[in-house]
Amino acid sequence: KVCDNSGAKTVKCIKVLGGFNKKIAKLGDIIVVSVQKLRNKSKITSKVKKGEVYKALILRTKKKFKTKDGINIKFQDNSVCLITKQGKPVSTRIFGPIPKILKTGKFTKIASLSAGFI
């Protein structure tokens, strides 16, 4: 699922970037995706088109992950945010919470677009 207002509703993972022979993507990883479905209202004014290939940042996963504090966090769905080749977000808003881990590092712009942190 896509949790931003770029116009895409669902995407399909093509490749996980980074690492040698990496097959599993974790929270904060960048993947290459193809747009599968668009949101109904935004088919005309969408920033993305069906079948286009983008990079995406993984924001939420169903798999549990442990923070440095020792807290286990798990989400109800797997969701991503579409980004450009330069690493900037395609959208102007991100729906739902994102983990505080993404607040640091090179994703501060995406963290500022989000509603809340966990």
Image: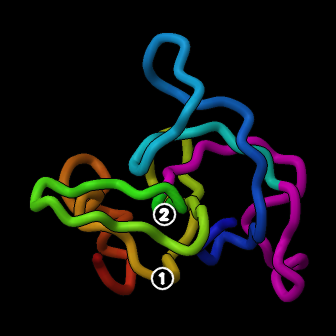
Task: State the image quarter where residue 99 is shown.
Answer: bottom left
Please tell me whether residue 74 is drawn above or below residue 17 in the rendered image: below
Q: Label 1: how many residues lie within 10 Å, few (<14), some (14-19) or many (20+)? A: some
SS under mark 1: strand
Please tell me whether residue 47 is drawn above or below residue 28 in the rendered image: below
Amino acid type at mark 2: Arg
* Front position in the image: 16 or 46: 16
Q: Tell me the CA gap for discs 1 and 2.
A: 10 Å
Give the side of residue 113 with respect to residue 43, left or right: left
Q: Which residue is mark 1?
A: 96
Q: Residue at x 73, y 66 (%)?
A: 47
Give the side of residue 114 with respect to residue 52, left or right: left
Please tell me whether residue 56 is drawn above or below residue 4 in the rendered image: above
Q: Main secondary structure of the magenta part?
A: loop
SS under mark 2: strand
Q: Residue at x 59, y 56 (%)?
A: 82
Q: Label 2: how many residues lie within 10 Å, few (<14), some (14-19) or many (20+)? A: many
Q: Which residue is mark 2?
A: 60
Residue 36: assigned label: none
Q: Could you tell me which quadrant the N terminus lies in? A: bottom right
Q: Give the magenta part as a residue range.
A: 36-58
Tell me residue 67's x, y (percent): 20, 57
- Reply yes or no: does residue 57 show up in magenta: yes
Give the side of residue 101 with respect to residue 17, left or right: left
* Disc 1 and disc 2 in contact, CB within 8 angstroms: yes
Task: State the image quarter where residue 34 is shown.
Answer: top right
Give the side of residue 92 with respect to residue 38, left or right: left
Amino acid type at mark 1: Gly
> Given this view, does label 1 or label 2 mark the residue nearer the observer?
2
* Front position in the image: 79 or 52: 79
